[in-house]
Image (cartoon, rainbow, N blue to C red):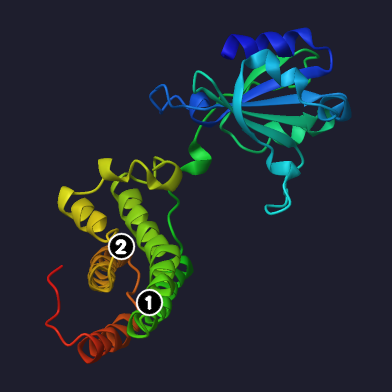
Amino acid sequence: MMDLLLSFAEKDERIRAATLEGSRANINISEDEFQDYDISYFVTDMESFLSGDDWLGYFGNIIMMQKPDDMELFPPQGKGYSYLMYFDDFKKVDLTLYPLDYLDEYVNGDKLVKVLIDKDGRIQKEIVPTDVDYHIKKPSTRQYDDCCNEFWFVTPYVVKGLCRREILFAIDHLNQVLRRELLRMISWKVGIETEFSLSLGKNYKFLDRYIPEDLWNRLLSTYRMDSYENVWKSLLTCLLLFREVSKEVAEKLGYTYPDYDRNISKYTIDMYMAYVGNELPES
């Protein structure tokens, strides 16, 4: 597939440069059969490519394609035009076209870029792909407090959904807000322990490599949300985990753990006892 992508770019005079992005450009990621080919072509004539899709057949038999920049439900946001393609051998190629005059801005932006072709010698400096832009960043005092504030402020929304028997409302707030901030806080714990020297990957996919097994298993247990009972358990476990990890992060960074926890936890437990009536589940 890489040979096809490169040979097409070499032969077509409209394509003046090509770059590789994503996990295949990252030396810290082990290669496997599931990696996408994230390729960008910088071209002199965008319209001639956009006038039809036949030229994409050069790369193989496409069994499904998405063109994010030509969708109404999900409006485009970038400067390029992308073709996200699955082929009949199940390889996936994310190919993006950019106008040639965007090349300098592009290669001076994201550092996880490998230059494959530069026909005109437009790129004057050596570019060494690095994932440094994706490393965990040390939070400021304000960022730490904002994370805590968001987590505890939205917790009553989950409680309200459970008490009203609106489980999808509760699940959505737990997943979209509480879990997001819990994972962020855990990533800061990992950052502290690794001197903020690495990335946990997209969607924290490498997190299990860097945290204790007990913490990992407890975190995984919060993903079971197929009943009101299990959402309550997941919520209460999330509260415990966030409290433990955020206090540890605060101690190691010299920050102050805010007092949101006390009042919101009391509210959560009071509502649980009032609406469920059972003893608190073990977490």
Q: Position of residue 262 (x, y in %)?
A: 28, 85
**Left or right of 208, for residue 165:** right
Query: What's the residue at 25%, 65% (across, down)?
Result: 241
Amino acid tagged 2: Val
Q: How many marks?
A: 2
Among the 4 quarters of the image, the one containing residue 271: bottom left
Q: Position of residue 239 (x, y in %)?
A: 27, 72
Q: CA distance from mark 2 to mark 1?
A: 25 Å
Q: Secondary structure at mark 1?
A: helix
Q: Position of residue 90 (x, y in %)?
A: 49, 23
Question: On the image, numbered disc 1 is attached to which residue?
Answer: 158
Q: Quadrant of the image for the N terminus?
A: top right
Question: On the image, numbered disc 2 is attached to which residue?
Answer: 249
Residue 17 visible in the current orientation = no
Q: Quadrant of the image for the C terminus?
A: bottom left
Residue 121 visible in the current orientation = yes
Q: Position of residue 188 (x, y in %)?
A: 36, 55
**Left or right of 257, for residue 110:** right
Crowding around mark 1 (Cα neighbors within 10 Å: few <14, some 14 to 19, many 20+) is: many
Amino acid tagged 1: Val
Q: Nearer the viewer, residue 222 or 248?
A: 222
**Left or right of 267, for residue 35:** right
Q: Secondary structure at mark 2?
A: helix
Among the 4 quarters of the image, the one containing residue 255: bottom left
Q: Is residue 271 above or below residue 67?
A: below
Crowding around mark 2 (Cα neighbors within 10 Å: few <14, some 14 to 19, many 20+) is: many
**Marks 2 and 1, the one that precedes in the sequence:** 1
Q: Is residue 210 above or below residue 251?
A: above
